Image: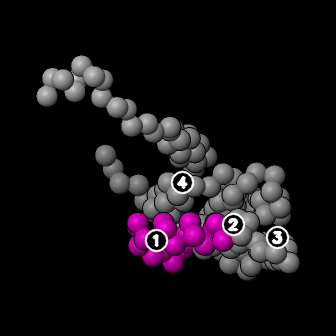
């Protein structure tokens, strides 16, 4: 399998409260620090437009900008939505740890790659259950 060429990009995690910062810290604990990963959280008394203004300052027109938000329809994602008028800015809601890691390590380089990444992320949602052994299995040992 050919190794995919790295896409120059920035990844912004945006959320209500400290979720984005916690997610960034956790992702970097697993994959190491990445200079292209940023986190912004909306706190009481703050305004989502302040976060968007900070992101705007960091957008490079030569790079892709991926914004991962916590909640579709939430104030932070709604404010960031206006940045998507730039065709190199992609906003995705429902961020989680596997998704954030994937965007940092292998950012999508096409609409098809983005859809594949999102589809794979959806498949990662699973209920995990530890099953007790049947009585017959216990007697066998």
Q: Which mark is residue 28?
A: 1
Quadrant in the picture for the C terminus: top left
Between 87 and 34, the one nearer to me in the picture: 34
Q: CA distance from mark 1 to mark 3?
A: 25 Å
Residue with the mark numbered 4: 99
Q: Which residues are magenta?
A: 18-37
Q: Which mark is residue 48?
A: 3
Q: CA distance from mark 3 to mark 4?
A: 22 Å
Q: CA distance from mark 2 to mark 3?
A: 9 Å
Q: Residue at x 39, y 37 (%)?
A: 130
- Helix, strand or loop under label 4: helix
Closer to the chain start, of discs 1 and 4, is 1
Residue with the mark numbered 2: 14
Does 33 appear in magenta?
yes
Residue 17: % across, % down:
71, 70
Closer to the chain start, of discs 4 and 2, is 2
- Would residue 82 be found to the left or right of residue 25 on screen? right
């Amino acid at each position: 399998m050919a190794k995919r060429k790295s896409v120059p990009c920035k990844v912004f995690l945006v959320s209500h409260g400290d979720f984005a910062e916690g997610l960034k810290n956790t992702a970097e604990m697993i994959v190491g620090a990445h200079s292209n990963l940023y986190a912004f959280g909306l706190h009481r008394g703050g305004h989502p437009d302040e976060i968007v203004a900070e992101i705007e300052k960091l957008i490079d027109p030569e790079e892709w900008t991926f914004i991962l938000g916590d909640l579709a329809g939430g104030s932070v994602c709604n404010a960031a939505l206006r940045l998507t008028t730039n065709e190199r800015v992609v906003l995705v809601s429902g961020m989680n740890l596997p998704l954030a890691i994937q965007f940092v390590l292998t950012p999508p380089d096409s609409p098809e790659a983005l859809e594949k990444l999102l589809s794979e992320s959806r498949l990662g949602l699973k209920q995990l259950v530890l099953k007790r052994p049947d009585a017959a299995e216990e007697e066998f040992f």
